[in-house]
Image: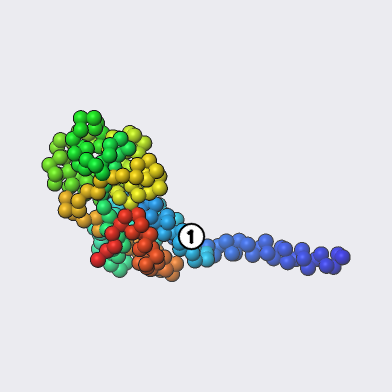
Amino acid sequence: MECMQRPLLTFGLLVLLAMPLFAQRTTSIRVAAASDLKFALDSVISTFSVPGVRIDPIYGSSGKLFEQISNGAPFDIFLSADITYPQKLVNTGHAVGQPYVYAVGRLVLWSRRVRTDAVGLDALKATTIKKVAIANPRHAPYGEKAVQALQHYGMYEMLSSKLVYGENISQAAQFVSSGAADVGIIALSLAKSPTMMQLQPQYYLIPEESHQPLIQAGVVTSYGKEKDSVNQFFDYLKGDQAGSVFQHFGFSKPL
């Protein structure tokens, strides 16, 4: 009996010793992603199944993430809410290849208190509207385009004192969904998220001609360029399955 136990004990020890080796084979891909992608990219990641590869998204404003990557932050992929920041990374040697346009975003006017789908931008003229949430236009493309839209309709000066700024478009959406702001100009992709659809499924789609297009692009960084798994996931983002998920969350398909 003792002779039989020894091989089993030896095998068990070998398995335990090998476990750290297997654990070490797991590759983590760090993706710096614009916050409008929160629900869409999480869904894309859930459909990406490659043994030993884990995708870790970090969400924030495109401008802030650009600054971090420019200063050497260890991100493998950068998915921006515009094409300008990825192109700058390529130009400065912090990214490789050319920016890939994965989607075109849209702005919407969203509120828990006002049926913006019924009254449109006139909702912003109501005296009951005290706070209007947008992303910070200094480093968030959605905030920059929101300002352009308000200027296009001659409403920016009227509303400038009512504007409250989120650090990114996700925080601006949080302001309005929590009631801290009366109305917000946010990303369609966030308005179509399960959380916000439950609160208010209606919104007003702001016409594209009122602002420069939200052409969203991504790049593989210099930090991640040598990793096969990084290029594998980046190629997956270009595929039909990922494209279908982006379209589900309101992104237009790039031409």
**For the point 20% across and 33% down, which residue is it?**
126
Residue position for label 1:
54
* Callout 1 crowding tier (Cα within 10 Å): few <14, some 14–19, many ≥20: some
Looking at the picture, tell me which residue is in the foreground, 99 or 225: 99
Looking at the picture, tell me which residue is in the foreground, 5 or 149: 149
Q: Tell me: 207 left or right of 190.
A: left
Looking at the picture, tell me which residue is in the foreground, 128 or 59: 128
The residue furthest right is: 1
Q: State the quadrant of the C terminus.
A: bottom left
The residue furthest front is: 118
Residue 155 vertical placement versus 105 (above, below): above
**For the point 83% across and 67% down, which residue is it?**
4
**For the point 15% across and 35% down, which residue is it?**
158
Question: Which amino acid is tagged 1?
Answer: Arg
Which x, y percent locates residue 124? 21, 37
**For the point 41% across and 59% down, which residue is it?**
44
Q: State the quadrant of the N terminus.
A: bottom right
Residue 218 vertical placement versus 181 (above, below): below
Which x, y percent locates residue 139? 26, 48
Q: Tell me: 214 left or right of 174.
A: left
Residue 188 can be seen in this image = yes
Which x, y percent locates residue 211? 18, 51
Looking at the picture, tell me which residue is in the foreground, 63 or 37: 37
